[in-house]
């Protein structure tokens, strides 16, 4: 199989050469590859497999909660199900999903580079991810874990379930995250081509750079915390156990000092995807580029200052709670800056409602609800009332699912032609977005009402007055699952029956659309022409090839910019 390669400046395809999917097809060539694109594809496969596993756990949970009493499992199994659902989704899917999978694939191409700065370190991060996943699966095989995905003490130091294998797995996954972060920072710092200044980078790269800062600075705190938990369980050292002179609340401080920044490890790359999709599908230059770029860095820095809002009902002092409440409101500002700039980009734009854009619109709506309810939880008075209720569950999922997962699906449909060189059925893609959006809201919006009315989270049985809300949530979860089945069918079908993708089907101006679909092994033959990544005036549509190309008038000036 052959594919076209770009000529001068990476503008037009010509000639033939095997692409990264077809050269060296053996399994061994994939296992030992240093190609960032293959590593990204393998990350995508593993994270999607984790998403499937975590989704099965979620469906089992919702099925059990269909009735107020026991439905399909006992209480101990239920505790293990929600622990495994949370741990798999957070540590194996959402945190590595966008940075490691999509970031690995698109970051070097968006820079116009051949690969990551450290290809071997990149492969090592994948190996560590797989090793950490093996320990997580081992924990499941040894009877599971019933502590909740946060592994809170004192229960995590007292339970007889497989806490140590699961926390060892999370510890190893942390190293994988740090390696990825180091690679992203060095690649962006050192491999930018001539003409690509900081303020000519696509906003996706700003998001990945800010994410890498959090990965490097915050992840070691989680690693040390889990290591201390393992030492206490294995050796009986008094770190978190009050009977041995420890403090269980100290664990919460350590855990959330990492885990609240980790929220933005999940959200920031998602925001980068939204910025990349919303501009070409609005046919407008992104509004407020500089503000969106700096807001990514602001989020990364402020995220380290707000962990205490998870602990308003602990032994924390009123003064500390007041300070953390104020800081929580402040971190909402840069997120709001992004949302308002996205809306301004769409305002009076020529909206193209293709599948990626539908996922983007779903993201803005759902993440908006998640952000708004986050303000309720940041206020001391309302947080005390709804703490540890289903209101928190709904807020968490509107933020963590309505944010990263909706954006990741949008990015997957957006870059799928670039990943695999095949187009999918547009109507099926739109249907999948509609089903997921509908199923998600039916699943989680009733939980806000339950939480306000006092339904505590994580309970196996519940009063009958909440039954209708749980039933609606369970029906919604089935619709949601069906929506993702349509996603899976649409994308897999395209691999076998989809038409060949052109180099630039969406009319995007960033550099990854200047190379063929899928890209050759080293991405570009010639250094691509560096332009404003959101300037669509340099492109023209070719109806014969159903593809966008650089205009003939686009010349390379001496400084590497368009004359």
Image (cartoon, rainbow, N blue to C red):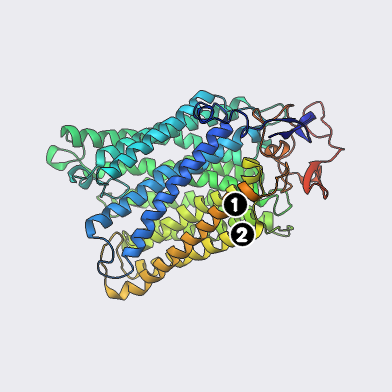
**Is 411 drawn above or below residue 370 in the view shown?**
above
Residue identified by numbered label 1: 493
Residue 78, how many percent across, how many down? 27, 57
Mark pair 1, 2: CA separation:
10 Å
Proximity of marks 1 and 2: CB atoms separated by less than 8 Å: yes
**Is 105 drawn above or below residue 51 in the view shown?**
above
Q: How many neighbours does mark 2 have within 10 angstroms: few (below 14), some (14-19), or many (20 or more)?
A: some
Quadrant location of the N terminus in the rendered image: top right
Q: Residue at x 21, y 40 (%)?
A: 240
Q: Nearer the viewer, residue 117 or 127?
A: 127
Residue identified by numbered label 2: 428
Q: Is residue 256 left or right of residue 371?
A: left
User: Exactly how many numbered labels are in the figure?
Assistant: 2
Residue 136, how many percent across, how many down? 33, 40
Q: Nearer the viewer, residue 65 or 539?
A: 65
Q: Residue at x 31, y 67 (%)?
A: 455
Q: Is residue 114 left or right of residue 51?
A: right
**Is 35 drawn above or below residue 498 in the view shown?**
above
In terms of secondary structure, where does tag 1 sit? helix
Q: Examine the rendering and report whether any part of residue 265 can be seen.
A: no
Residue 111, how many percent across, how many down? 65, 32
Q: Is residue 113 left or right of residue 303?
A: right
Quadrant location of the C terminus in the rendered image: top right
In terms of secondary structure, where does tag 2 sit? helix
Q: Label for residue 328? A: none
Q: Which residue is most to the right?
A: 553
Query: For residue 17, which quarter of the picture?
Result: top right
């Amino acid at each position: 199989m052959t594919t076209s390669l770009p000529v001068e400046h990476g503008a037009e395809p010509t000639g033939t050469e095997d692409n990264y999917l077809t050269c060296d097809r053996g399994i061994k060539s994939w296992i030992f590859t240093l190609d960032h694109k293959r590593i990204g594809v393998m990350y995508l496969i593993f994270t999607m497999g984790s998403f499937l596993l975590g989704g099965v756990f979620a469906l089992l949970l919702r099925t059990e909660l269909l009735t107020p009493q026991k439905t399909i499992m006992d209480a101990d199994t239920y505790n293990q199900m929600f622990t495994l659902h949370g741990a798999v989704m957070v540590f194996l899917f959402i945190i590595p999903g966008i940075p490691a999978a999509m970031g690995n694939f698109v970051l070097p191409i968006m820079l116009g580079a051949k690969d990551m700065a450290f290809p071997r370190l990149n492969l090592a991060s994948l190996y560590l991810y797989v090793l950490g996943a093996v320990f997580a699966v081992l924990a499941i095989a040894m009877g599971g874990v019933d502590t909740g995905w946060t592994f809170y003490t004192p229960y995590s130091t007292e339970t007889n379930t497989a806490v140590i294998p699961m926390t060892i797995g999370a510890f190893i996954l942390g190293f994988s995250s740090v390696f990825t972060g180091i690679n992203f920072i060095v690649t962006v710092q050192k491999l930018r081509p001539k003409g690509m200044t900081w303020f000519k980078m696509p906003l996706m790269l700003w998001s990945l750079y800010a994410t890498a800062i959090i990965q490097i600075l915050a992840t070691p705190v989680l690693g040390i915390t889990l290591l201390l938990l393992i030492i206490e369980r294995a050796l009986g050292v008094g770190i978190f156990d009050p009977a041995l002179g420890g403090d269980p609340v100290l664990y919460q401080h350590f855990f959330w000092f990492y885990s609240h920044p980790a929220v933005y490890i999940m959200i920031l790359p998602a925001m980068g995807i939204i910025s990349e999709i919303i501009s070409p599908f609005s046919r407008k230059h992104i509004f407020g580029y500089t503000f969106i770029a700096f807001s990514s860095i602001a989020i990364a820095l402020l995220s380290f200052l707000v962990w205490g809002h998870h602990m308003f009902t602990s032994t924390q002092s009123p003064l500390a709670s007041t300070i953390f409440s104020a800081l929580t409101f402040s971190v909402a500002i840069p997120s709001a800056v992004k949302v308002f700039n996205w809306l301004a980009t769409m305002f009076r734009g020529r909206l193209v409602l293709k599948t990626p854009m539908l996922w983007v619109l779903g993201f803005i709506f759902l993440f908006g609800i998640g952000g708004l309810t986050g303000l309720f939880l940041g206020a001391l008075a309302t947080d005390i009332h709804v703490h540890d209720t289903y209101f928190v569950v709904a807020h968490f999922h509107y933020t963590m699912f309505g944010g990263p997962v909706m954006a990741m699906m949008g990015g997957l449909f957006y870059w799928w032609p670039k990943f695999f060189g095949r187009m999918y059925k547009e109507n099926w893609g739109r249907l999948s977005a509609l089903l997921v959006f509908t199923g998600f809201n039916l699943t989680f919006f009733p939980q806000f009402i339950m939480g306000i009315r006092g339904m505590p989270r994580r309970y196996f049985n519940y009063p009958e007055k909440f039954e209708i809300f749980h039933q609606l949530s369970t029906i919604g979860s089935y619709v949601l699952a069906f929506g993702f089945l349509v996603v899976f069918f649409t994308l897999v079908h395209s691999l076998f029956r989809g038409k060949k993708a052109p180099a630039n089907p969406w009319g995007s101006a960033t550099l990854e659309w200047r190379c063929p679909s899928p890209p050759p092994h080293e991405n570009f033959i010639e250094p691509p022409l560096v332009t404003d990544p959101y300037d669509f005036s340099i492109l023209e549509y070719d109806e014969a090839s159903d593809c966008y190309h650089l205009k003939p008038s686009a010349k390379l000036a001496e400084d590497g910019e368009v004359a």
